[in-house]
């Protein structure tokens, strides 16, 4: 007996079942993805640093440590390295660095400082011009890895411009008096940032630089050579 | 197309997302394959009913 010709494509039930399957599966997938992401982006604490556990978003107490951006051979891109490099681009969590003269900020102090910096960055609308972790504007420089910018480091043009001896003091000085320091054709306006807010903002920036962004921006460490090249000219 | 797993946190989705489009291709495959099954089931049912 020959089978009757039937049209599945014009059958309502086929589309109903397909839609139910796609919607149901996608809902479960999104819930799963949400929990998966939450686990990965939860901020670490000092205990993680003590136990040498690298987190995507490390503890606020990283402001006590030296922060670099080095090539990790295994991962094939640059990663934030906290407290010294083991030679392969992994954090040692040992080498400290003074932040406004101290390297013993407690969890509570560091959290409070970062919180103040975050609130200040929102109150002053940094994102109106700058980009933070992919959010914001591209009118002014991207601040995601601003802490690692060699221009703010020792012998860097931005640090020497402010006449300060450390990166954090130079950044804080600039934030309080941006009008005094012509850095760019698009000059930063004076936003009335207080010394306390500036300290919080710099802590916020230092912490943000330690967030693992899977190698974004790529080749950032090479800017160092650019600075040296510009100085030699 | 599939590269070594180098994420700092191991995760199922991270594992699938190591190459260009690998996560997308996997998820679309997983979603579309059961639709073939639904299609043939419905075809059988229609043939039976008509």
Image: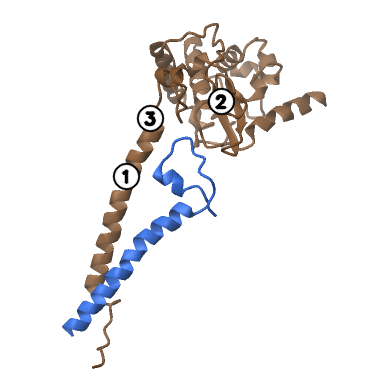
User: Circle 3 sits on which residue?
Assistant: A42
| Mark 1 vs mark 3, CA separation in Å | 16 Å
| Mark 2 vs mark 3, CA separation in Å | 19 Å
| Mark 2 vs mark 1, CA separation in Å | 30 Å
User: Circle 2 sits on which residue?
Assistant: A81
Q: Do labels 1 and 3 share a chain?
A: yes
Coordinates of residue A233 in the picture (x, y in percent): 83, 26
Residue nearer the viewer, B6 or A162: B6
Position of A79 relative to A19 (above/below): above
Give the secondary structure at mark 3.
Answer: loop
Q: Nearer the viewer, mark 2 or mark 3?
A: 2
Coordinates of residue B22 in the picture (x, y in percent): 48, 54
Decide which of tag 1 and tag 3 comes sooner along the chain.
Answer: 1
Decide which of tag 2 and tag 3 comes sooner along the chain.
Answer: 3
Position of A118 relative to A8 (above/below): above
Label 3 resides on the chain identified as: A
The shade of chain A is brown
Residue nearer the viewer, A34 or A115: A34
Label 1 resides on the chain identified as: A
- Residue at point 42%, 56% (across, down): B26
Of the 4 image quadrants, the one containing the N terminus of chain A is: bottom left
- Residue at point 47%, 16% (across, down): A200
- Residue at point 61%, 18% (across, down): A179
Image check: A232 left or right of A89?
A: right
Give the secondary structure at mark 1.
Answer: helix
The quadrant holding residue A230 is: top right
Taking the image as drawn, is residue A188 in sight?
no
Q: Would you call the spot at circle 3 few (<14 residues within 10 Å), some (14-19), or many (20 or more)?
A: few
Label 2 resides on the chain identified as: A
């Amino acid at each position: 007996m020959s089978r009757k010709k039937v049209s599945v494509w014009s059958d309502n039930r086929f589309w109903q079942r397909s839609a139910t399957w796609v919607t149901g599966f996608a809902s479960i997938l999104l819930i799963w993805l949400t929990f998966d992401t939450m686990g990965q982006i939860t901020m670490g604490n000092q205990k993680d640093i003590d136990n040498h556990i690298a987190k995507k978003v490390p503890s606020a107490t990283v402001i006590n440590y030296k922060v670099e951006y080095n090539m990790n051979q295994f991962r094939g891109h640059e990663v934030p390295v906290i407290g010294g490099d083991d030679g392969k681009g992994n954090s040692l969590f040992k080498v400290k660095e003074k932040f406004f003269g101290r390297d013993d900020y407690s969890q509570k102090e560091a959290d409070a400082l970062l919180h103040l910096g975050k609130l200040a960055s929102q109150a002053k609308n940094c994102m109106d011009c700058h980009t933070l972790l992919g959010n914001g504007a591209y009118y002014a420089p991207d601040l995601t890895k601003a802490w690692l910018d060699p221009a703010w480091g020792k012998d860097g043009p931005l640090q020497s411009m402010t006449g300060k001896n450390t990166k954090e003091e130079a950044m804080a000085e600039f934030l309080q008096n941006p009008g005094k320091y012509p850095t760019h054709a698009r000059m930063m306006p004076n936003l009335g940032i207080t010394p306390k807010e500036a300290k919080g903002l710099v802590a916020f920036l230092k912490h943000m630089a330690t967030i693992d962004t899977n190698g974004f921006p790529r080749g950032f460490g090479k800017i160092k050579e650019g600075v040296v090249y510009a100085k030699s000219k | 197309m599939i590269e070594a797993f180098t994420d700092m946190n191991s995760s199922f989705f991270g594992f699938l997302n190591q190459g260009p489009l690998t996560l997308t291709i996997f998820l679309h495959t997983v979603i579309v394959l059961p639709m073939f099954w639904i299609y043939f089931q419905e075809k059988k049912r229609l043939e039976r009913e008509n």
